[in-house]
Image (cartoon, helix red, strand yellow):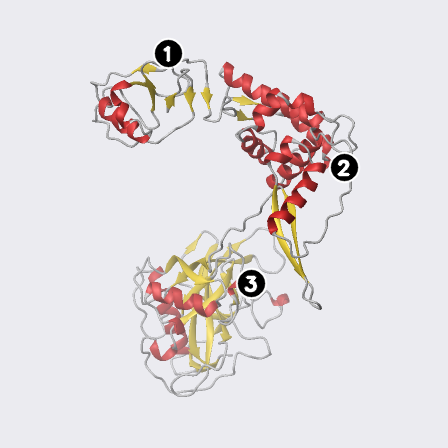
């Protein structure tokens, strides 16, 4: 900053970036260049201080910034020789005159941060603070039929005095309790300590403040003429004079403008221009045409252990759909979009598949969809073919069958047994394999059984954990292929187990409901946790649907 001829500090702050090994003489030269004082460098005296709570000190221009322990936001002050000595108690003075107010914080009375933000903006508004600290008493409208009869203006002026007094005494905060009480009487909807809208508060406060210092005691009705092809300057001046007759206050003079609007008759084509006054000009914030969607991507079991679940943030168009999201995720992870499936996951199981044509606009901003890599059956690792012996399909009703995985060799801790489950669902659309057979989606979920002390029929209660894994399989699937696929998808979770040989699988498959809590077919009275899918030495085929 710099001073004027009276030694007062002018509010003309500039930011200077300079190395700490530089001398203060170099810093003074650079600061003079910022304030257009390059030709008067020799006539400038340099002061410095570390914060506003420290007195200004004359700088030794022969020493470096590092020697003087300069830190970020260190303050420099330029004073011309021949001017009045520096007045440390003069405070900051704006170039337009008047002390700079508002260097004091406002205490948050509950959730009144909206009010504090608006007050700080008004305190820093030029001429408004000076008016209410000196001349507003002559304009207080106590007899008007609107406003607060001057109470709001007095409360605002007293708050400005409190802020000014706190600044002079070195206080850091002021509690606007009385101002809040007066304004709540004026607008009861702002009573209490709830959160409110800052613009709504500012609009109502300025309207009430303007009415309290309005010199017009009775607002006359003024009939405005049509523009009738007259120049805009003439019509605008007519509207403005009518506005000033009704609103003769300093607040209206500071916070008023005019909107130009035109009205065209669809019958005769006559155009009428009007210039309506306004105090607030809402400006829309430009929105991006894209959005960011955070997804949890579950890759196939061919990935390395530890890389099964990856969180990515994909950029997609706001007008796009789930298919666009899958293409974006596939491009980021080098995966085929046709092999990706989007779904909603809840409590360890797939709650719902997301249709590829579903618009992203219906998804909330905080939605976290899951994307699964489910290759088609012909792209899976080859599984030895076996002869077909068709068993009874597991689809006994319209309800799709579900399969659970568990076994005696699963790790048991205390009375808890770790199991897993999977569920088949038809793939959306008419998907088929290379030989023309239909493809269905099977979900593999992880389930464990915990023994409970209080129970009705079964002492074990099932619960899901971990991440579900969907897989595509042919509708006519051998039990060997079903078990082999399930093992391929979960074997990275138990790396200490050896590869099974023959029918020696470390788990069993069972039919369960969607959430894996009970059997899909048996009655709840039986307490069945899932019918076991049999594994035989001879080949067997199951029908998935």
Per the image, label 3 sits on a secondary structure element best described as: helix
The disc at residue 219 is 2
The residue wearing badge 1 is 85
Asked whether 105 or 447 is in front, the reply is: 105
For discs 1 and 2, the disc positioned in front in the rendered view: 2
Location of residue 47 with respect to 421 vertically, above or below: above
Query: Counting other residues with Cα less than 10 Å from the Cα at mark 1, is it few (<14), some (14-19), or many (20 or more)?
Result: some
Q: Position of residue 384 (x, y in %)?
A: 32, 81
Residue with the mark numbered 3: 362
Mark 2 lies on a secondary structure that is: loop
Distance of label 1 from label 3 (alpha carbons): 67 Å
Which sits in the foreground, 262 or 211? 262
Occupied quadrant, residue 146 = top right
Crowd rating for badge 2 (residues with CA inside 10 Å; few <14, some 14–19, many 20+)? some
Question: In the rendered structure, which disc, 3 or 2, sits on the residue that comes first in sequence?
Answer: 2
Name which residue lies at 69% across and 67% down. 266
Classify residue 347 as left or right of residue 9. Answer: right
Mark 1 lies on a secondary structure that is: loop
Give neighbour class at mark 3: few <14, some 14-19, many 20+ (Cα, 10 Å). Answer: few
**Residue placed at 64% from the left, 26% from the top?**
156
Instruction: Look at the image and tell me whether residue 404 can be seen.
Output: no
Check whether the beta carbons of the residues at disc 1 and disc 3 lie within 8 A of each other: no
Cβ atoms under marks 3 and 2 closer than 8 Å: no
């Amino acid at each position: 900053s710099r001073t004027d001829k009276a030694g007062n500090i002018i509010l003309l702050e500039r930011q200077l970036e300079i190395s700490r090994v530089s001398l203060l003489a170099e810093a003074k030269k650079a600061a003079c260049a910022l304030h257009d004082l390059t030709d008067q460098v020799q006539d400038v005296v340099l002061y410095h201080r570390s914060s506003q709570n420290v007195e200004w000190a004359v700088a030794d221009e022969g020493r470096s910034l590092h020697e003087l322990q300069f830190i970020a936001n260190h303050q420099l002050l330029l004073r011309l020789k021949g001017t009045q000595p520096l007045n440390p108690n003069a405070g900051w003075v704006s170039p337009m005159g008047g002390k700079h107010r508002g260097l004091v914080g406002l205490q948050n009375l509950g959730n009144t941060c909206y009010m504090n933000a608006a007050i700080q903006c008004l305190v820093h508004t030029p001429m408004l603070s000076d008016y209410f600290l000196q001349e507003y008493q002559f304009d207080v409208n106590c007899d008007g039929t609107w406003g607060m009869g001057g109470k709001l203006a007095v409360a605002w002026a007293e708050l400005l005095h409190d802020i000014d007094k706190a600044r002079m005494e070195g206080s850091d905060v002021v509690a606007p309790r009385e101002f809040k009480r007066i304004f709540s009487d004026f607008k009861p909807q702002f009573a209490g300590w709830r959160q409110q809208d800052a613009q709504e508060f500012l609009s109502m406060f300025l309207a009430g403040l303007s009415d309290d210092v309005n010199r017009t005691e009775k607002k006359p009705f003024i009939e405005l003429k049509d523009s009738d092809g007259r120049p805009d300057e003439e019509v605008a001046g007519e509207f403005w004079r009518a506005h000033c007759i009704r609103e003769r206050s300093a607040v209206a003079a500071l916070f008023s403008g005019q909107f130009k609007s035109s009205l065209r008759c669809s019958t005769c084509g006559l155009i009428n221009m009007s210039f309506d006054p306004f105090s607030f000009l809402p400006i829309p914030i430009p929105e991006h045409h894209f959005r960011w969607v955070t997804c949890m991507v579950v890759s196939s079991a061919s990935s390395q252990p530890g890389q099964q679940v990856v969180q990515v943030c994909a950029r997609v168009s706001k007008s796009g759909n789930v298919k666009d999201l899958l293409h974006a995720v596939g491009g980021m992870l080098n995966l085929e979009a046709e092999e990706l499936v989007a779904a909603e996951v809840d409590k360890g199981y797939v709650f719902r598949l997301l249709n590829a044509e579903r618009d992203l606009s219906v998804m909330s901003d905080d939605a976290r969809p899951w994307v699964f890599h489910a290759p088609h059956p012909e792209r899976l690792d080859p599984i030895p073919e076996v002869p077909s012996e068709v068993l009874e399909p597991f689809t006994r009703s319209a309800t799709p069958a579900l399969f659970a995985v568990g076994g005696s060799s699963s790790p048991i801790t205390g009375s808890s047994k770790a199991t897993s489950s999977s569920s088949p669902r038809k793939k959306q659309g008419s998907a088929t394999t290379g030989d023309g057979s239909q493809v269905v989606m099977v979900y593999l979920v992880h389930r464990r059984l915990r023994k409970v002390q209080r129970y009705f029929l079964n002492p074990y209660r099932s619960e899901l954990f971990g991440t579900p894994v969907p897989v595509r399989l042919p509708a006519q699937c051998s039990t060997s292929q079903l078990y082999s696929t399930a093992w391929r998808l979960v074997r990275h979770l138990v790396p200490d187990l050896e590869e099974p040989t023959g029918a020696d699988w470390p788990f069993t498959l069972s039919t369960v409901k969607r959430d894996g809590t009970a059997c899909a077919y048996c009655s709840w009275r039986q307490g069945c946790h899932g019918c076991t899918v049999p594994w035989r030495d001879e080949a067997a085929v199951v029908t998935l649907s």
